[in-house]
Image: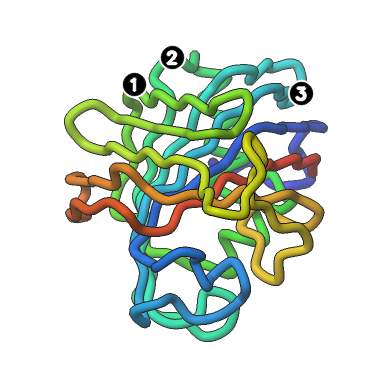
Amino acid sequence: MSETTAAVPKWHVAGDWFDTCKCNVPCPCSFAQPPTFGECDGVLAWHIREGRYGDVRLDGLNVLMLGSFTGNLWDEHTDAYGAVFLDERADDAQREALMMIFGGQAGSWPAEMMTMFGAEVRGMDYAPVEIEVAADLSGWRATVPGRVEASAEALTGTTTPEGARCQSTNLPGCETGPGQTATWGRSTADRADAFGFQWSREGQSSKHITFDWTGP
């Protein structure tokens, strides 16, 4: 973790991110507005479809975070806390790469997000992080057995064409950075019991957003 950005190799990761949170649909945070209830907590999950950190391959690995804050995430917020689960399948080199990228030390968008969020980290663990995203984006889910469960179905309604998705581009507050596409959903499960985070609910906001980062 002491490696400086100047020593970071060229890297690239791309894949799927989604959250399940406390906010009503759609989550105002993605529009750079304060959360529905003035504070928010939820599950954030990343699945790396393809990735490389120097010569270290990261394809298929997962990262999950629990987070909470009060106020506008993109403006003035306080009481920011987080906890991280890294994929236990990762070997030592992959674990170091994941920590560098998602901890912000490797630059690019995660570094900007981590600096802005400024969360107090309550803990980190290596765990069996399981993430599934339907190919047609009809739903997504993530679990850390016995500790976290998050799942959602894509948002649909009377005027949504069959098989189509409710999506947004150019979000004012895109959690994975500029240029990504968000697909809106509603949670079917949002439960956490780890590192002092504890909640259980369903029916609130969820969204899937692609991510594509290159560093340093």
Residue 43 shown left or right of residue 118 in the figure = left
Circles 2 and 1: CB atoms closer than 8 Å: yes
Q: Position of residue 2 (x, y in %)?
A: 57, 44
- Name which residue lies at 52% across and 73% down: 28
Residue 39 shown left or right of residue 164 in the figure = left
| Numbered disc 1: secondary structure | loop
Residue 115: quarter of image: bottom right
Circles 2 and 3: CB atoms closer than 8 Å: no
Label 3, on which residue? 54
Residue 36: quarter of image: bottom left
Vertical side of 27 occupied by 158: above or below: above
For the residue carrying disc 3, how many other residues have a C-alpha within 10 Å: few (<14), some (14-19), or many (20+)? few
Q: Which mark is residue 89?
A: 2
Circles 3 and 1: CB atoms closer than 8 Å: no
For the residue carrying disc 2, how many other residues have a C-alpha within 10 Å: few (<14), some (14-19), or many (20+)? some
Query: Which amino acid type is shown beneath numbered disc 3?
Result: Gly
User: Does residue 21 appear in this view?
Assistant: yes
**N-terminal of the two: label 2 or label 3?**
3
Rendered-image quadrant of the C terminus: top right
Vertical side of 6 occupied by 21: above or below: below
Query: Which amino acid type is shown beneath numbered disc 1?
Result: Pro
Q: Which mark is residue 128?
A: 1
- Name which residue lies at 64% across and 44% down: 165
